[in-house]
Image (tube, grey):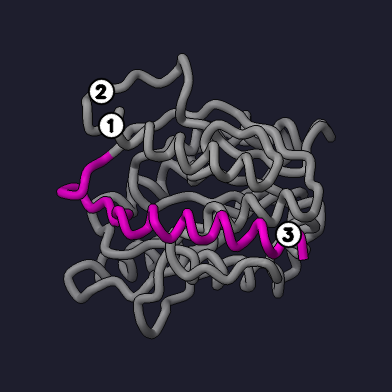
Amino acid sequence: MPTLHIVIPVFNERGTLEPCVRGVLAAPLPEGWDRRITLIDDRSGEAHFPAVQALVDVLQSERQLLTFHRHKVNQGKGAALQTGFDSILSSSALDHDLVIIQDADLEYDPDDYASLMQPIIRGGADAVVGTRWGRHYRVKSLKHRVHMLGNGTLTVLSNLMTGLRVSDMECCYKITSIGWLRRIRPMLSEKRFGIEPQYVAALSRLKARVTQVPVKYDPRGVAAGKKIGWKDGVRALIVIARERFSRRK
């Protein structure tokens, strides 16, 4: 049975992790597909980690397909994703299985999995990047509009460097096959949010067929635990420029 591998990095998200994981487990998938969660705790603090461990214990008692890792020190989202990718690639995962990234908050809706999977299943794409922006998204505040414009600027610059034509390079939802992940993984090194432009640049360097699918999005603020900041935007610019150089080389 083909499997969708869901990689979930988590850091200090005790209030959102369980409903997120339950949403992942309940999300409809195409007929005949199974799912497996790879959860990586990026050294959550003492106030948060007991909730992570308790959830892992419950999921294991329910015999859910779950692999769990915990970093010895906090390293960042990119490092957690690399740990998850390495875990999957060293397992018995098949090349035609799929792997998707899922943030541990409630900004993204796992019910979008099926639509994100379809272009690859049908053979029309090697990878899919979700897009939060478009007619389906209603801007709720000035802060959200500024966030959208900032992401849009980074995406335009990324597209200029990679030659791709996506509208939301920073979107969490990126999905590809295990076979493609084997080729992408050696190109990933960013420890924090720079992993987003680096992942997209790797797809471009490998000449993958990339398409995009609209996804639902419910943004949260810093008070609710959002961790990305202006320094990560600067880092994204550096990664975009550097990866272009690497691509030429």
Residue 236 in magenta stretch: yes
What element does badge 2 sit on?
Answer: loop
Give the residue type at disc 3.
Answer: Arg
Number of the label disc, if any, that sits on residue 247: 3
Provide the residue designation for mark 1: 144
Tell me if label 2 and label 1 are in contact, CB under 8 Å: yes
Q: Nearer the viewer, mark 2 or mark 3?
A: 3
Give the residue type at disc 2.
Answer: Lys
Residue that appears at 45% across and 34% down: 152
Q: How far apart are the alpha carbons under marks 2 and 3?
A: 38 Å
Provide the residue designation for mark 2: 140
Residue 146 is situated, as x and y percent measured from the top left of the image, at 29, 33
Tell me if label 3 and label 1 are in contact, CB under 8 Å: no
Number of the label disc, if any, that sits on residue 36: none
Residue 61 in sight: no
Is 245 positioned to the left or the right of 122 in the image? left
Residue 156 is situated, as x and y percent measured from the top left of the image, at 54, 37
Is 138 positioned to the left or the right of 157 in the image? left
Residue 213 in magenta stretch: no
Is 207 positioned to the left or the right of 65 in the image? right
Q: Main secondary structure of the magenta part?
A: helix
Q: Nearer the viewer, mark 3 or mark 1?
A: 3
What element does badge 1 sit on?
Answer: helix
When the figure is inspected, residue 105 is found, relative to residue 66, above or below; the finding is above
- What stretch of residues is rendered in magenta? 220-249
Q: How far apart are the alpha carbons under marks 3 and 1?
A: 33 Å
Is 22 positioned to the left or the right of 173 in the image? left
- Counting residues from the start of the chain, the first of labels 3 and 1 encountered is 1
Give the residue type at disc 1.
Answer: His
- Classed neighbour count for the residue bearing mark 3: other residues with Cα under 10 Å, few (<14), some (14–19), many (≥20): some
